[in-house]
Image: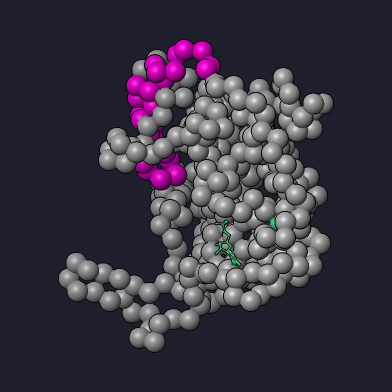
């Protein structure tokens, strides 16, 4: 381990940013707050939910009586496909610079069941979600006017997501957005300078050291990144060099679904609650360029720190100076590694005394 007892900073190789780590503050044994397991049950169907089958959405649309997954264009899309009447040229006045952005926003319902989450969907249904992601990526990414396809999921009220119905989103833009653009540059520079893919090299190190690895299957490794910022942040990385999700074969698609479900079960078991997070897939842009340096991956950024009601805020020093954490990535990985892959709600007594 690096600087086990000493404050230090770690470099995020994907972004070039640093995170301050203060391990001496958590030398004390785990003091996770004990709260009774959260067994608040949702109905399988909610007549007020705008994502449930057969229900009305805003703007007059009605959901079909879908039995599997369901995709629609967001009724309140942050992006619109039509370029402005003035065209796509930037507008500026000295230091004031603006440029048009066009694109589309889609919503993906993972299941007709209002009460399920990725942790409870089962691998078969999760694999159907992966197939939908691939279809959306192919359809949107294949368009002339789309340079990047961001697939993501924002889950739980702690993350500002008000609707528990299992769903994710896809925002596709003409330009490559900020964070993927930074990862694009970092990976391109690494390949150019070291003649090796950044994440292939990183994964080799992590598999050899093992201290941040949670588990792996044939196609994917799941780990807490060395440079993690969120307390229980993780990454899912393909073990072979794949630039985007369309490069997965059917077995790899299923392995991705399996890895996601297993990770989500562990997450739910950590604080015996339906675990909130933002998840996103970072992959090669669809701007027609060549992207051999891209190694696609999933980021999970969960906000919870010590219990289902104690979350980390990014405030003060972190807002003004740099991100910081007390719990080391290694301790977080150890905690997640020791958890069961049987969901606490499936235990006899629904997690009581677990
Ligand atoms: P959340 O992941 O933030 O809950 O997003 C769900 C999306 O669903 C949100 O972006 C859209 C919102 O704009 N929505 C519709 O498209 N139609 C509706 O009738 C309600 C919500
Ligand atoms: Zn619903």
- Residue 83 position, x and y percent, is 44, 81
Q: Is residue 10 magenta?
A: yes
User: Which residue is situated farthest in the top direction here?
Assistant: 28
Q: Is residue 295 above or below residue 285?
A: above
Q: Quadrant of residue 17?
A: top left
> In the shown orientation, is residue 98 left or right of residue 196?
left
Looking at the rendered structure, the number of numbered marks drawn on it comes to 0
The residue segment tinted magenta is 7-31
Whether residue 295 appears in this view of the structure is no
- Residue 133 position, x and y percent, is 66, 59
User: Which residue is situated farthest in the left direction here?
Assistant: 94
- Residue 142 position, x and y percent, is 60, 72
Taking the spot 60% from the left edge, 43% from the top edge, the residue there is 237
Image quarter where the C terminus lies is top right
Whether residue 291 appears in this view of the structure is yes
Q: Is residue 130 magenta?
A: no
> In the shown orientation, is residue 49 left or right of residue 347?
left
Q: Is residue 310 above or below residue 48?
A: above
Taking the spot 61% from the left edge, 25% from the top edge, the residue there is 35
Q: Can you tell me which quadrant of the image ligand 1 is in?
A: bottom right
Q: Quadrant of residue 73?
A: bottom right
Taking the spot 45% from the left edge, 51% from the top edge, the residue there is 183
> In the shown orientation, is residue 195 left or right of residue 269?
left
- Residue 109 position, x and y percent, is 69, 59
Q: Nearer the viewer, residue 55 or 254?
A: 55
Q: Nearer the viewer, residue 312 or 253?
A: 312
Q: How is the image coloured?
A: one colour
Q: Is residue 140 above or below residue 284?
A: below
């Amino acid at each position: 381990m690096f600087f086990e007892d000493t404050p230090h900073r770690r470099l995020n190789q994907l972004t070039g940013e640093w995170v301050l780590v203060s391990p001496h503050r958590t030398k004390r044994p785990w003091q996770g707050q004990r709260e009774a397991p959260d067994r608040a049950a949702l109905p399988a169907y909610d007549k007020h939910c705008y994502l449930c089958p057969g229900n009305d959405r805003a703007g007059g649309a009605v959901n079909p009586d879908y039995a599997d997954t369901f995709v629609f264009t967001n009724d309140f899309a942050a992006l619109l496909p039509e370029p402005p009447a003035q065209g796509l040229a930037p507008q500026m006045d000295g230091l004031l610079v603006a440029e048009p952005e066009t694109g589309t926003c889609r919503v993906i319902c993972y299941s007709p069941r209002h009460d399920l989450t990725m942790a409870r969907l089962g691998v078969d249904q999760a694999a159907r979600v992966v197939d939908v992601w691939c279809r959306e990526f192919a359809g949107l990414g294949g368009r002339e006017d789309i340079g990047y396809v961001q697939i993501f999921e924002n889950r739980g009220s702690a993350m500002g997501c008000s609707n528990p119905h299992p769903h994710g989103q896809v925002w596709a833009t003409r330009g490559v957005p900020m964070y993927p653009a930074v990862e694009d540059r970092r990976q391109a520079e690494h390949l150019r300078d070291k003649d090796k893919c950044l994440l292939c090299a990183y994964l080799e190190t992590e598999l050899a050291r093992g201290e941040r690895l949670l588990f792996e299957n044939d196609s994917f490794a799941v780990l807490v990144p060395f440079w993690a910022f969120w307390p229980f942040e993780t990454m899912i990385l393909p073990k072979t060099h794949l630039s985007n999700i369309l490069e997965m074969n059917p077995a790899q698609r299923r392995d991705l679904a399996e890895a996601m479900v297993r990770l989500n079960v562990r997450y739910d078991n950590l604080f015996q609650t339906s675990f909130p997070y933002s998840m996103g897939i970072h992959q090669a842009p669809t701007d027609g360029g060549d992207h051999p340096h891209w190694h696609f991956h999933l980021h999970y950024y969960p906000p919870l720190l010590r219990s289902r009601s104690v979350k980390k805020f990014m405030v003060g020093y972190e807002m003004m100076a740099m991100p910081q954490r007390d719990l080391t990535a290694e301790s977080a990985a150890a905690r997640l590694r020791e958890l069961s892959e049987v969901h606490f709600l499936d235990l006899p007594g629904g997690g009581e005394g677990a």
